[in-house]
Structures are given as structure tokens and as C-alpha cells.
């Protein structure tokens, strides 16, 4: 079904009088007509800011630029925009200029953990690969606000090859996360080339892509893009829905294309004050996500990036939300609540306390209802001593995959892969005599 409601038609006509649904659903048209000024925002939404506020907003945009897709703009409730979660994520606030002493330009020390251009290598077996410095929309809560609007926004192949070469020369890397900006800002051909280079590296087991396109520009998920991506399974895709209002007919269509193509989908939300810091909102969001085959993956505590203090909540708010989810909804609908440690310490899971006490043979626990119970530890448990000398370990760890292709009977004799030349019945007298003579 074509999706082009009255509000979208009105916005499209204001942008260009001859615009139609084909224009609206063309992701390149959407990018070309992104809203990047206060004046254009007012024209398309009918929202008019007081002059004094407008001057302060202009000062904000000088430091943190504005860019909103017409699609995402159409989701704003312009009659109640000041309380609208879409507006708050998309449009500038004068509070962004409130830079605290604790705010950091690079709060996660990504630049410090960058061995070569474009690579952040923090965890032992995986890297984050920055393949784009631009997004289809500049989210106001972005942790990489320092990179927003960079002139040199799309790395060329020579730049990306430096990162690819680093991955090739670092055999412990089994997982590569493509990030940015948004990787789907690259052309289909560029994505095809990039994935072909990375997946050709023998020790790379999986590739992940982090994108907000299904949220802010779902039309980017074209049939051709999906066709390109399908060539490179196993490919995991994480997106970034923060509020139920962002899950529209168009976003559902984009998610369905990806899910139907076999990509495991995850979602990373950021806990934002006055946007989604409510147990009812988050429960509704995770329910809508799993209905669309998206597993809630992370719920992030808002980072200490410059200009985000008005978005931050106490950690206790996140714990409260988890208490409303754990036991009260499907287990896989509960995201892991994490604080991305300042200074590059990585993601630290934060959970409510369920262990009340612990002795040598018993654990006292409480459940989601507040029921207190005990779990009896085993009377006897002897773990096998491990000297950590893995190269000379005599344990049968059986780490290899099981072989389902064992040939039997005549098939075994016919198989070129099996060296067996005879099938000998049990208790064959002649073979028994051979074994006795050999002994």
C-alpha cells in the first residue's frame, strides 16, 4: 500500500509544488530536501518561534548543525511540538549550549582507541569501523556531535582500505561493526565493495551494521540495497528507535524487507529525559519492536557528550524501567541497560539487584513480584583443575562442529572421502586371530 498521508503531501508540495508520492519515497529526494534552517522548518511545519528564541537557536546551530528529513519532520505533532518526542530528537534546543564541566568532546575516547584512521579497537575480538561521518538526519542526542557536519564526510576507498588492512593484519578480530554517521549513506555499489572486502578476510566471522535509516528515512531500505546485503550473510543489522511514535507504516515496511531477507535485527535505544524516560513508553516500544521482528538489544544511559545534559536521566530511572520490564514482559523483549564508560571503558551492564544474600551453600533471591526465595547450592562440586595452558590441555573440549555426514555401510565403501576398504562383521575369526598375533 502506498503511504503518503495528508501531512506528507502538504510538506512535499511546500518543498516543490509538483512533488508526488514517487518523489516522497525517493530517499535521494528526501536527502536533497533536508530541512537545515529555522526558516524552512517554520515554513514546512507552521511552527513559529519568538524572535528572541530564534536568535538563540541560530547560535545553537552555529555549533551543532540542523538536518531533518522531510519524512521525519512529518511525524512531528506541530500542535503540541514542545512535548513531542520526535521534535525533541530532531530540532535544536538552546539547552545544547549548556556545556557542563563534566561534558566531553569525545566521551568514549574513540579517537584514543583508534590505531588507524576509521578504526576504533576497544574490545579484544571486534572493531568499530567508521565508514561515514554523515547521517540522513542529525539527532540532537548524538554521542558523536563532534563529527556532525564534517566537510570530508564520506571516506574514499584509499581511506577505508587503511581500516581493511588493519583488520586483515589483526587475526583476533572476528566481528566488524560498520558505523558512522550512517553506513547506509553510502551508495549501494560502495556498500557492495566494502562488504566484499571485509567478508573476504578469513578470520572475520560476522559483520554488523548500525543504522538509523529505518527510523528517520525508511525509504533508503530499497529492494536493491537488500539484494546487495543478502550477498554477505551472516550480516546483523542494529537500528535505533527511541519512541513508539517512530514506528510507522513506512518504518514497518523497511523492517519487514530486512527481516524477510534473513537479517537478525536489533535495536539500541538511548534513555532520554522527557522523551522516553517512562516505563509505559519503553514497554510499549519494546512490544512494538518485537512485533516487527526487532529484538531490543541495548538501552543506553545518555553519554557525557557536549550539549546533552538536558537529555540525561539519573541511572535510577533506567533501573526503574528495567523493573517494569523484567518478569512483566517477554524475556527477549528486555534490553540490556548499559552505561558506556567515559574514557573508553566500554559498555557496563547495570541491573536491579536480585541476589539478596549468599552463604556457602545457599543463595537468597527475590523475583520480580518481590517474593523472596532460596536456591540450594550443590553439596559437592569439584571443578577440574585448569592451569590455563590451553596449548597442552588434555581435556576433550569438543569445540568443532558435529559431523552429520558420516557415511555407513555400502555408502562408506563408495565414498571417496572415506579410506575404509572393507566392512568386517563382529567376531570374525580370521581378524580376531590377526589381533591376537599382533598382541
Image (cartoon, helix red, strand yellow):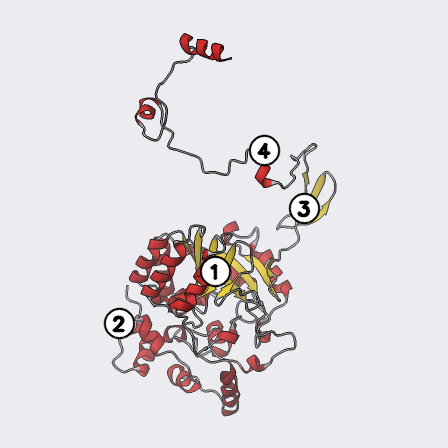
From the image, state whether disc 2 or disc 3 is nearer to you: 2
Q: Which of marks 2 and 3 is nearer the N terminus?
A: 2
Residue farthest to the front, as pictured: 438
In percent of width and height, residue 39 lies at: 41, 87
In percent of width and height, residue 418 lies at: 36, 28
**Alpha carbon distance from label 2 to label 4:** 65 Å
**Alpha carbon distance from label 1 to label 3:** 47 Å
From where the camera sits, is residue 424 visible? Answer: yes
Q: How many discs appear?
A: 4
Q: Which residue in the protein does label 2 denote?
A: 22
**Alpha carbon distance from label 4 to label 3:** 38 Å
Instruction: Give the vertical position of 215 relative to 138 (above or below).
Output: above
From where the camera sits, is residue 288 visible? Answer: no
Say the numbered circle drawn on residue 394: 4
User: Quick one: 14 or 238, which is closer to the camera?
Assistant: 238
Q: Earlier in the sequence, mark 1 or mark 3?
A: 1
Q: Is residue 297 left or right of residue 254?
A: right
Instruction: Give the vertical position of 152 relative to 239 (above or below).
Output: below
Amino acid at each position: 500500500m502506498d503511504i503518503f498521508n495528508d501531512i506528507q503531501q502538504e510538506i512535499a508540495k511546500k518543498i516543490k509544488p509538483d512533488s508526488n508520492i514517487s518523489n516522497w519515497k525517493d530517499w535521494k529526494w528526501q536527502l536533497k530536501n533536508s530541512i537545515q534552517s529555522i526558516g524552512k522548518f517554520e515554513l514546512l511545519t507552521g511552527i513559529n518561534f519568538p524572535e528572541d528564541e530564534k536568535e538563540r537557536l541560530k547560535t545553537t546551530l552555529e555549533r551543532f548543525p540542523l538536518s531533518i528529513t522531510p519524512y521525519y519532520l512529518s511525524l512531528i505533532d506541530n500542535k503540541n511540538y514542545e512535548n513531542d518526542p520526535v521534535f525533541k530528537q530532531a530540532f535544536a534546543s538552546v539547552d545544547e549550549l549548556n556545556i557542563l564541566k563534566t561534558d566531553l568532546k569525545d566521551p568514549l575516547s574513540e579517537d584514543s582507541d583508534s590505531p588507524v584512521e576509521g578504526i576504533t579497537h576497544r574490545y579484544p575480538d571486534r572493531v568499530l569501523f567508521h565508514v561515514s561521518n554523515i547521517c540522513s538526519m542529525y539527532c540532537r542526542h548524538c554521542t558523536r556531535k563532534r563529527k556532525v557536519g564534517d566537510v570530508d564526510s564520506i571516506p574514499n576507498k584509499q581511506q577505508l582500505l587503511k581500516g581493511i588492512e588493519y583488520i586483515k593484519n589483526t587475526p583476533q578480530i572476528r566481528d566488524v561493526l560498520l558505523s558512522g554517521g550512517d553506513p547506509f549513506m553510502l551508495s549501494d555499489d560502495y556498500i557492495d565493495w566494502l562488504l566484499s572486502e571485509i567478508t573476504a578476510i578469513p578470520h572475520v566471522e560476522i559483520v554488523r551494521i548500525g543504522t538509523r535509516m529505518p527510523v528517520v528515512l525508511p525509504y533508503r531500505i530499497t529492494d536493491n540495497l537488500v539484494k546487495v546485503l543478502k550477498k554477505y550473510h551472516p550480516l546483523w543489522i542494529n537500528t535505533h528507535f527511541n519512541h513508539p511514535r517512530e514506528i510507522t507504516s513506512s518504518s514497518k515496511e523497511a523492517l519487514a524487507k530486512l527481516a524477510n531477507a534473513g537479517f537478525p535485527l536489533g535495536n539500541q535505544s538511548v534513555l532520554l529525559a522527557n522523551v522516553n524516560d517512562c516505563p509505559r513508553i519503553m514497554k510499549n516500544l519494546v512490544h512494538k519492536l518485537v512485533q516487527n521482528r526487532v529484538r531490543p538489544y541495548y538501552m543506553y544511559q545518555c553519554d557525557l557528550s557536549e550539549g546533552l545534559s538536558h537529555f540525561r536521566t539519573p541511572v535510577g530511572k533506567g533501573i526503574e524501567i528495567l523493573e517494569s520490564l523484567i518478569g512483566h514482559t517477554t524475556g527477549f523483549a528486555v534490553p540490556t541497560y548499559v552505561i558506556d564508560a567515559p574514557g573508553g571503558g566500554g559498555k557496563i551492564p547495570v541491573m536491579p539487584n536480585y541476589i539478596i544474600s549468599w552463604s556457602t551453600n545457599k543463595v537468597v533471591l527475590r523475583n520480580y513480584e518481590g517474593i523472596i526465595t532460596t536456591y540450594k547450592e550443590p553439596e559437592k562440586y569439584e571443578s577440574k583443575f585448569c592451569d590455563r595452558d590451553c596449548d597442552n590441555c588434555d581435556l576433550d573440549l569438543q569445540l568443532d562442529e558435529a559431523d552429520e555426514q558420516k557415511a555407513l555401510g555400502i555408502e562408506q565403501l563408495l565414498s571417496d572421502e572415506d579410506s575404509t576398504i572393507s566392512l568386517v562383521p563382529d567376531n570374525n575369526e580370521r581378524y580376531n586371530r590377526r589381533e591376537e598375533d599382533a598382541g
